[in-house]
Each structure stands twice: as C-alpha cells, then as structure tokens.
Amino acid sequence: MITTSFAKQFAEHWLTSWNCHDLDAILSHYAEDFEMISPYISSVAHEPSGILKGKKSVKDYWNKALSIYPELHFEFINVLCGMNSIVINYKGLRGMAAETFILNSDGLVIKAIAHYE
C-alpha cells in the first residue's frame, strides 16, 4: 500500500517539476514503458485513442503541450493514496483536474490517467 508520506512527497515533486516545466524531472516519476491516457492527447498529439506509450512518445507530447501553453501552472489541491496508486487533484489552466497514477514496486508510474472538468 502507498503511504500518505510517499504520496505527499510524490505529489510535491511532480507538481514542482511541472511548474518548472522540467521534462526530465517530470519523467523521472515514470517507468520507461508507461502508458499515458488523456483527452488532450487526441488534440495535441493527434492520437485518436487518447493513449500514448513510452517515455519518448509522452515526452514529445508534453514538450509540444508546454510550447502551446507556456504559462502552464498547477495549483495543488490534495493527494489520495491507494494500494498501488496515487490520485493528485490540482487546479490547472482550464480548471480542476485529477490524475491517477498506477505505480510499480519501484514507485514509478506504469499508467497515468488524466481527468479534467
């Protein structure tokens, strides 16, 4: 089970990495072959499934997204923890958002699912 301490530390580093627009720091939270699911993948990466796999694909997508939204900033709301998952609730450019992270035994994300209002 994910501890509250680990979840808070993960969320803090993840949000700081995003707010600094540091792609290498952001990607340090993810396994090499992780899967990203987001409704924005369809419009930004032109992938109709909304799913990308692997750090290279996701890095290209996030790099493009950061160039489109250079003012991107996340405001922490809260973090929830589960057996092998974390949910971070935050406020982004377009309102409230939540991301669910499924982690492996090394504490790295193997699947991320983004939700927006």
Image: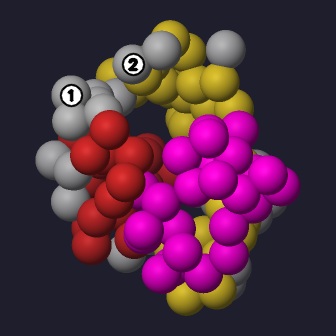
| Residue placed furthest toward the left | 20
Please name the residue shown 26% across and 46% down the image.
Answer: 67
Q: Does label 2 or label 1 sit earlier along the sequence?
A: 1
Please name the residue shown 83% across and 55% down the image.
Answer: 49
Neighbor class of circle 1 (other Cα within 10 Å; few <14, some 14-19, many 20+) is: few
* Image quadrant where one finds the C terminus: top right
Quadrant location of residue 96?
Answer: top right
Q: Secondary structure at mark 1?
A: loop
Amino acid of disc 1: Glu
- Where residue 93 is drawn, which disc sits there? 2
Please give left or right for residue 98 compared with residue 59 in the image: right
Please state the extent of the stretch shown in magenta in the rendering: 39-62
Judge whether residue 100 can be spotted in this image. no
Q: Nearer the viewer, residue 104 or 69?
A: 69
Q: Which residue is mark 1?
A: 71
Q: Nearer the viewer, residue 11 or 67?
A: 67
Residue 85 image offset from top left, x and y in percent:
71, 56
Q: Is residue 60 magenta?
A: yes
Position of 62 relative to 28 (above/below): above
Measure how far apart labels 2 and 1 are at the Cα level: 8 Å
Neighbor class of circle 2 (other Cα within 10 Å; few <14, some 14-19, many 20+) is: few
Quadrant location of residue 88?
Answer: top right
Position of 78 relative to 20 (above/below): above
Judge whether residue 88 can be spotted in this image. yes
* Image quadrant where one finds the N terminus: bottom right
